Amino acid sequence: MSDHRLTAVELDAQSLPAANAEIEHERRVAIFDLVEKNSFHPAGAERGPYRLKLSSQENRLAFDIEGPDFARTYVLSMSPLKAVIRDYQLICDSYYEALRGSSPSQIESVDMGRRGLHNEGAEALTARLDGKVAIDHETARRLFTLVSALHRRG
């Protein structure tokens, strides 16, 4: 039986903007979570597991995928994802600020909005990968976190 999943994920260091400790932690946790549990099946690949390197190249998102019998790079325009990434980053900033001194109900409200935008980003990423890589919703959410991290400054 095939093993269509990721066993290693890397963010291209040259693509990453400078980040504070919170953002670095967010990146590490997202990679850990993604590698721990995912469903990742590139079209045309017979078997996995796979290694993924994400990078940003001239306003495009590059997925470098390698597996036992598969190696391919998909380069996708970032334009369809830009608005949701921008909104997601803004609400993440609001969430971190709320954690520092808001009431539990205010934190919960901001967190609900953050989760909604996270789901929207995951759906947009799934649509961008349609026909290239089949992923489940949780994998899409974790990948969206990493894609967002490629554009997050801190």
Image: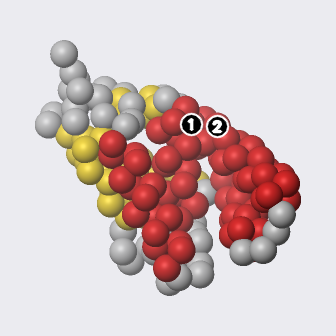
What residue lies at 49% left-to-right and 29% top-to-bottom?
A: 136
Q: Secondary structure at mark 2?
A: helix
Q: Which residue is mark 1?
A: 126
Dot 2: few (<14), some (14–19), or many (≥20) neighbours within 10 Å?
A: some
Could you tell me how far apart the alpha carbons at marks 2 and 1 are, in whole angstroms? 5 Å
What residue lies at 29% left-to-right and 29% top-to-bottom?
A: 4
Q: Is residue 72 visible?
A: no
Seen from the viewer's position, the closer of residues 82 and 122 is: 122
Q: Secondary structure at mark 1?
A: helix
Residue 68: where, in percent of width, then height? 14, 37
Residue 37: where, in percent of width, then height? 37, 37
* Residue 42 higher or lower than 66, as above or below: above
Is residue 94 shown left or right of residue 134?
A: right
Q: Quadrant of residue 9?
A: bottom left
Q: Which residue is mark 2?
A: 123
Image quarter in which the C terminus is found:
bottom right
* Residue 135 higher or lower than 86, as above or below: above
Q: Is residue 88 visible?
A: yes
Image quarter in which the N terminus is found:
top left
Is residue 71 shown left or right of residue 127?
A: left
Residue at the extreme front of the image, as rendered = 103
What residue lies at 50% left-to-right and 64% top-to-bottom?
A: 26
Whether pointer 2 and pointer 1 mark residues with C-beta atoms closer than 8 Å, the reply is yes
Amino acid carrying mark 2 in the image: Glu
Is residue 87 shown left or right of residue 27?
A: right
